[in-house]
Structures are given as C-alpha cells and as structure tokens.
Amino acid sequence: MDTPSQKQYLDLYDANAATVCAHAPAVMNERRAAARAVLEATPLPRAGSEGHKYADLNAMFAPDLGVNITRVPFRVDPAGAFRCAVPNVSTLTGFTANDVFTAGDGLSERLPQGVTVCSLSDAAGLMPEVMEHYYGRIAPADNAAVALNTLLAQDGVMVHVARNVRCDKPVQLVNILGGAGIDMLAVRRLMVILEAGAAIKLLVCDHSDDSRANVSDAVVEMDLGPGAQLEYYDFEESSPTTSRYASVTVRQDAASRLTMNVSTLRCGTTRNDIRVELNGEGAEAHLGGMAISDGSQLADTSATVLHNAPHCISNQIFKYIVDQNGRGAFEGLIKVAPEAHHTEAYQNNRNILAAPTSRMHTQPQLEIYCDDVKASHGAATGQIDARALFYMETRGIPRDQARTMLMQAFMADVIDAISLEPLRDRLRHLVEMRLAGIHASCGACPPSVNCSNSEK
C-alpha cells in the first residue's frame, strides 16, 4: 500500500538499518519495526483526502531528500551565527541544526535542579525508565508521517521537569534548517515530560535559509502529570522553499494546565497536527494560534481536543490572514466522551481574506456523547472592514498603513493570550513587520551552518 514517496524511505531504512540503529539508543530502535509496518500499510495523505484539504504530505515527502543517516555533525556557532533572542527575556537556550541538538553555552549549569534539557541519547542513559515509558507511546501510532519519523529518528531533545519543580526562566529551543548544500529531510523529535506539580515555559522557534527546498518532519510528545503547568509557544519564521510537518500530542492528567500558541509568521508549506487529550479530572487546555499566508505559501492546522474526563475545560482560538494567492486551512474537532460530564469546551476560528485570489478552508466539528456539557464552535471568513478602512483614510492615515493596523488589531487577542510580556511585544512587532511586507525575522537568518558530508 506504500506510495513511491514512502517507498524511497522504506528502501533507505532497509538498506541502512544497521547504521541507523547504531547511532540511536535501544529504546528508539525498539519502536522501528512497528513504525515500518504502519508506513508500509498507511499512505501519506494527499491534498483533498479527508482532513487534508490543501496539505499534500505525499508531495511534501516525494522529492529525493538527503537524510543524515551517518549522524554527521552540523557545524554551527549559535552565539555568532544565529541570534533568536527576545528582548528582556533571559532564556535557557538549546539549538537543533537540522536534526542534531547542541546545548547553548552553559545550559546544563544554568538549569535549576530537577530540570533536564538534553539529547534523547543522553536521556536514555540518565532516565531510561522515562524514555521507555513515554517515547513513541504518546504520538498517534497510525499516522504515516509520525511513523516515518519514528522509523528514521536517531536522536532528539528531552525536556524533563521533576516533581514539584518550577522552572522560572523560559527554555528556548531554536531549530535551524538548511546549510547542508543539498535538499535535506530533518527528522526531529521532542519530548516534554512534566511530573506532578512541575511547571515550565517552553519557546520553540523554527527558522530556515532560502537556498534549498528543505523538509522538516517533527514529532512532539508531551505528558503533563497531575497539577503540572506548561506554556508552549511554537513560532515558525521559515523560507518559502521550506516544507514543515509537525505532529504535537499532549496528554494531561488531573488538574494540569496547558497554554499553547502555534503561530506561522512565514512559511512555504506548513501542516501542524495538534492533539490534546484531557485524561484527568479538572484539566485545562487553552490553545491559540495564528497564521499569515501569501504568495505560494500554505498554512494548515488541524486541532483535536479529546475530553476524556469530567470537569475539564478547553478553549481554542485560531486566526488566519490570507493575502495574495495564499492558502490557509483549519480543521478543528472537540470530542467529549460519555463519562466527561461537566465539560466546558469552546472553539473559534476567524479568518481574513485580504485579496480576491486568497483561499481559506475551515471546518470546526463537535462530537458530544454526554448530556451535561457546555460547548460551542464557530468559524467566520471575511474581508477587511471597508467602513473602518474608509474612516481611517478620512483621518489622514495612508491606505496601506490603515490596512496593516486593522489586520494587526484582528490578531490582538491571540497575541494577548501569551503570558510573557516581552514575548508578546516581540511577536506584535514581528506581525506588524510581516503585514507590512518587511522581512523581519526574530533572528539573524540565514544561519551559518555547514555540513560537508550529509548523505542519503
């Protein structure tokens, strides 16, 4: 049942299985056989298939992409070559150059006791029971793109916070894609495990250069123990030649709280699959995101929230601005299980089509199998308010500036949900520059990354 785009990776793995496994911990190798079976039997979704109006994952992975099978290190000087800093926020920083993790200067020494940020290879030695219990057991096993990641992943990043430990400084992970001199497939894995009562803020930034048609296949697995609190911010500022697939799955125990923002400021083709499972009584999930798309860019998000326990709350708000020839898509699902009484669940998608040639697909959905529920969903797609634009022009504001101001105001509530004030201010600035057509990334892109021996 495999397609040609999948077959090349199945053949690649079969020819290099010993090399792949030699560079990875045993727990990662133990998951490969099941992943291979899924990838062989389950086709990568094409555009127009269920849940994929525009995003064509089969086409995304079809090119002959380089894979760093032999784990050649990508040489990068993060301090000198790439700066992705938020003013007035002191972060604990790590870097992933394509698929190779590097800790920032003094990261281990600066982390509070009970907080670990390291490679998955190191985590397998430091906390083998955590890796065995969680790795490959949170992300959806029947997803072909996730199976491709599990089949080829050789390392990744672990963020672990011990019981009742609170990390006051945000942790920032900067993902850099490119610099290898060939079109690359970066296979990335991130695990975030919070034990009971733990708390952390995590900022993930994706950047790429403009020279190659690179692809990122990222799988994020997160588990929040009872009473744990996670703020997770995922910002993408990549080139129009970049394709990104990201599967983000969160499991929440009782009284845990998740705040998530997934924002696409600039991209080529991006598909975000978000899945949140509220498995413990009293858990809360607050999801937000935004995307700005124009030209040949596609920003596509699928958000699923599963209410599996009583007295849980979820809120979702996602907004898109789609300009000249751009495409956007949002599909959301709230599913309330029979035992999940006293659920409160809300989903809202709002979109602006800023040009006649822009396209937006939206499909909010509710599945409720319990009577005692408060739930709503809604979606609206429209154009810039012509009356407001005319009013601002009559007050002497140039049309282009007025247009930018109205679109920025449209995004305000998504940005305002971010708890870190300096991060809110930085994102507000980036959105303003993006809407004004100015390329103002949050770092000094492209990075100075060099790899002389990447291979497939």
Image (spheres, rainbow, N blue to C red):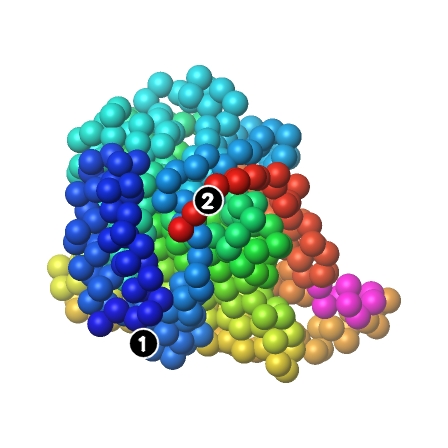
Q: Which residue corresponds to the image point at 82% horizontal and 65% vertical from the top-left?
A: 397
Q: Report the residue marked by disc 2.
A: 454
Judging from the image, what secondary structure is the residue with disc 1 in?
A: loop
Could you say which is closer to the camera, residue 347 or residue 305? Answer: 305
* Residue 159 % position (x, y): 35, 34
Q: Is residue 104 above or below residue 232?
A: above
Q: Report the residue marked by disc 1.
A: 50
* Residue 146 % position (x, y): 30, 56
Q: Residues within 10 Å of mark 2 (few under 14, many from 20)?
A: some
User: Is residue 443 among the parts visible in the rendering?
Assistant: no
Q: Which residue is at the far right?
A: 396
Q: Main secondary structure of the magenta part?
A: helix
Could you say which is closer to the camera, residue 430 or residue 230? Answer: 430
* Residue 141 % position (x, y): 21, 56
The residue stretch that appears in magenta: 397-405
Q: Is residue 315 left or right of residue 240?
A: left
